[in-house]
Amino acid sequence: MIVLLAALPLLFAFLTALTVPLRLEKLAKYPFLAGAVAPWAVFLFEKAGNEVVGGWPRIGGIEVSLDVYNTPLVLGELILFTAVAVYSLDYFREVKAFVLLLLLHAGLLGAFISRDLFNFYIFMEIASVSSFALVGSSGKRKAVRAAYKYLMLSLLASYFFVFSIGVIYLKTGYLNLELISESVMPSKEINVAIAIAFASLLLKAGIFPLHVWLPDAHSLAPTPVSALLSGAVVKAPAYGMILIFSALPVSEGLSETAMVLAVASIFFGVAMALLQKDAKRLLAYHTVSQMGYVLLGIASMNFVGAAYYAMAHSLFKGGLFLSVGSLGKKSRKLGEFGYKNAPLMALSVLMLSLAIGGVSPFIGSYAKGLISSGLAGAWKWAVLAGSVGTLVSFTKLNYYLTKGEAPALPLSWKFASFALALAAFVGGLVLGAVPKVTDVYLLLAGILLFLLFKMAGVFELTLEKEDVKPGEVNTGAMLFALFLLLLLYLAEL
């Protein structure tokens, strides 16, 4: 049964929590690992298709599915979470962290398999609430403030998303996506609901210009949490966009706006990353950039391309956070740590850097090819230029990492990082990515631009942030309100 993908992690989260009252905390890692890998059994042996839980009629039941759109997302989440689970054994000491991670696991898988809007919302919120707690779990002042900002802005988006679901239900009489798509008629109310849902999901996904919570939350969270936030959590709202855009009549104006925002997010994220000296914050801004590619696929109605790019991003960005976070566990400032004495970590970072830059035969190249296949004209050039910018940024990262040494690292951390790098490589080969001459030009362009920027002193500039201020929540809320008004105006055109 497909629903077991989400049910099994929930069961093992309960069993893991049960070790506390039974005073068996030392055994908590076993139900935690079981909950991490148990969904694999369902995924590997369950056939693709749709099912309504409990045999209820579709109109009143909860429908789940494994199809061409969500299978890559589920697979990417399973691979990433398995690696993070292994990494977490030597990172977390408290049982509550293992329980929250399993709740996050269940929430993400539940959201990815959902075929009705309300069920999707419930599971997305399970994942979100777990994320808030995990971001602030270190207890450090900046991390707690980042978790608070993430919480408040995400809740704001949730309220509006539920409102949009209500409008859709009132106009169609359904929450099931299949039934909605069969009965929906274009109207002013539906256009408004789509605009509100899109703005809400854009904020939750951390895409420009509603990214304001993401750099703080992703960079200040514990390293395994950062990997999950970037690699998987922001994919749940992206999948929500796929559901909305595939089932409802999205206006041409909204699609074009989404295309522009996608390209803006790609280049804004790269530009901000180039000005960071905090390694994890550099990676966080690249999440803003990389989610632009996912949105580009969604906006061009290339949902398969968006799903595969989301899967690819789960692997290489999750691996980068684990690798760089491990190397910089004492200091995250570029130049103060590195991988000179850690050859396996060096190989992992280099492989993952090529993957995120779209160099074949890594999976990033295949996924960017899918995104480009659904584009025409100047939009294709945006993907190519974005790849060059990404390679410049990761040339910078590797340049600084060659100058420092790594602290002593547990074997599980090295294994988890390399496993994701290997997955990014093997995934590309399996999907058919082959070396191309253009890859050489991309690499040369990235290295050349890095050298030019370095000589020009660009990397001496910095946009470092000293603290996370509570007032930033108000700024983010105002930005969301203005953006929503803009979308509502466009919805009327």
Image (tube, rainbow, N blue to C red):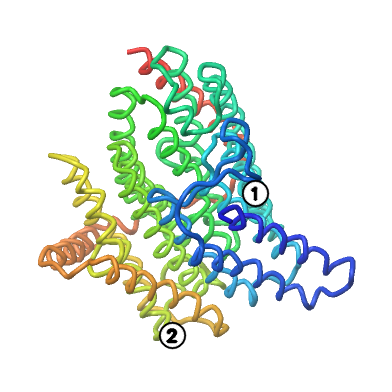
Residue 18 spot, x, y in % from top left:
83, 65
Q: Residues within 10 Å of mark 1 (few under 14, many from 20)?
A: many
Tell me the amino acid under the disc marked 2: Ala
Residue 94 placement, left or right of 20: left
- For the C terminus, which image quadrant? top left
The answer to whether residue 442 is above or below residue 204 is below
Identify residue for label 1: 132
Q: Which mark is residue 43?
A: none
Q: Is residue 462 visible?
A: no
Q: Nearer the viewer, residue 364 or 370?
A: 370
Q: Quadrant of residue 364?
A: bottom left
| Residue at figure coordinates x 49%, y 37% from the top left | 203
- Distance between mark 2 and mark 1 Cα atoms: 33 Å
| Residue at figure coordinates x 31%, y 39% from the top left | 264
Q: Nearer the viewer, residue 67 or 134?
A: 67
Secondary structure, mark 2, is loop
Tell us which disc is closer to us: 2 or 1: 1
Secondary structure, mark 1, is helix
Q: Which mark sits nearer the N-terminus, 2 or 1?
A: 1
The answer to whether residue 125 is above or below residue 99 is above
Residue 221 spot, x, y in % from top left:
59, 58
Q: Nearer the viewer, residue 170 or 344?
A: 170
Residue 195 placement, left or right of 359: right
Identify residue for label 2: 342
Tell me the amino acid under the disc marked 1: Phe
Q: Quadrant of residue 455?
A: bottom left
The answer to whether residue 150 is above or below residue 314 is above
| Residue at figure coordinates x 61%, y 46% from the top left | 128
Residue 270 spot, x, y in % from top left:
32, 51
- For the N terminus, which image quadrant? bottom right
